[in-house]
Amino acid sequence: MKMFIVVLTMLVGLLSVTPLLAAEDDARFQIHVLQEGNKGLTVQEAMTLALPVLWQRVVPMQNLEKAKLLRGGTSLVLQFKRDSRGVNLVFNPVQVQAYLQRNNIVMIPESPYWNLQIDVHRFTESDVNMANDLINYSYSISEDFGFHLGSHGRSLKLGFSQLVDAYGEVQLQVDVQGAFSANILSETKQLPRGDLSYQLQSWVEKTLLEIRDAYSLDLIQFHDDTSSIYITVTSDLTLAAQVSLEQLLSRQPAVKAVIPMLLQKESKQYRVILKDADDSWVESWFASYGMAAVKQPQGSASQWMVE
């Protein structure tokens, strides 16, 4: 799934070699290789089997095919230990990063740690069960792709909901929220045919990997004060007026991004990502365009209702 990443601050050049945690503290560099039969694996044989697993964990998706062509060398291996089922390998992260850099591949320097939440809205009566299944799926692939999930990680929330567009067509809205200093905007897709759960798993996987890569390559930076508000416009706007309003709102100095959440004939809801937590400008801004914005009580579906 292609994600649209708006980068506020682009860094010049790619990452240089930086100090890393010791390999024993980073599970990405610890790989167990199973052996077939009674013949023991050599270091080179075990490393050949382990490298595809390592590359999937530490190389951005855009460079993964290139990395798969690399054969490595035993100097990448920090520890080699046999057991009854095969071999435990521990790779040296500093050597691995230097080796990838010599081949013009940037390594993901650390394992992202996220407090992941997934919401599924307006699909079936079992939306909550579907969301839980997607969380469980995310945990099941975390080791394979080199990220860590837990309650103490950075906030990351994925939302999947049905969206009715201005023409009455039902589409799928994919929304990403989190503690980012650059905006990862939502994307609207056609509802898939066939197994919806399987398709949602695919989008969850692709989204997590894109954020892993972008965050790890310093294309986005995390912080803890991302602020957004929900605004519902109840005026019966023409399509042209609706598009114009969205464009004007997105250019308001306090606004980072405007994300349509629900577009119906007489009700349109937007998630508005702010540069800070101040939304005191909303009432006067809409008033300047002849509309009335009313602040809603805490806990309402939208912070502002506009007529």
Image (spheres, rainbow, N blue to C red):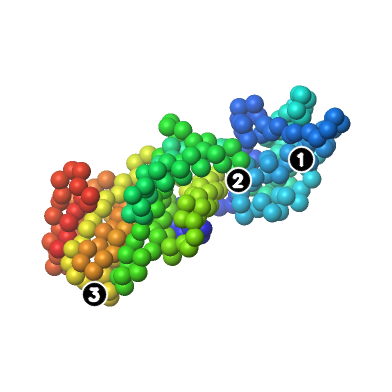
Q: Which sits earlier in the primary sequence, circle 3 or circle 1?
A: 1
How far apart are the alpha carbons under marks 2 and 3? 48 Å
From what the image shows, is residue 273 above or below residue 31?
below
Residue type (three-letter) at the residue carrying disc 2: Leu
Q: Which residue, given by chain and number where applicable, does mark 3 sit on?
A: 238
**Mark 3 residue crowding within 10 angstroms, few (<14) / some (14–19) / many (20+):** few
Residue 155: percent from left, percent from top: 41, 40
From what the image shows, is residue 136 above or below residue 260?
above
Residue 49 — which label?
1
**Secondary element at tag 1:** helix
- The residue lying at 72 percent from left, 36 percent from top is 95
- The residue lying at 46 percent from left, 45 percent from top is 134
From what the image shows, is residue 138 above or below residue 122?
above
Tag count in the figure? 3
Q: Which residue, given by chain and number where applicable, does mark 2 sit on?
A: 15
- Callout 2–callout 3 Cβ contact below 8 Å: no
**Secondary element at tag 2:** loop
Residue 166: percent from left, percent from top: 30, 70
Residue type (three-letter) at the residue carrying disc 1: Leu
Residue 163: percent from left, percent from top: 34, 61
- Callout 3–callout 1 Cβ contact below 8 Å: no
How far apart are the alpha carbons under marks 3 and 1? 60 Å
> Can residue 113 be seen in this snapshot?
no
Say which quarter of the image contains residue 44: top right
Viewer-nearest of discs 3 and 1: 1
**Mark 1 residue crowding within 10 angstroms, few (<14) / some (14–19) / many (20+):** some
Q: Which of the pair 97/67 is nearer the observer?
A: 67
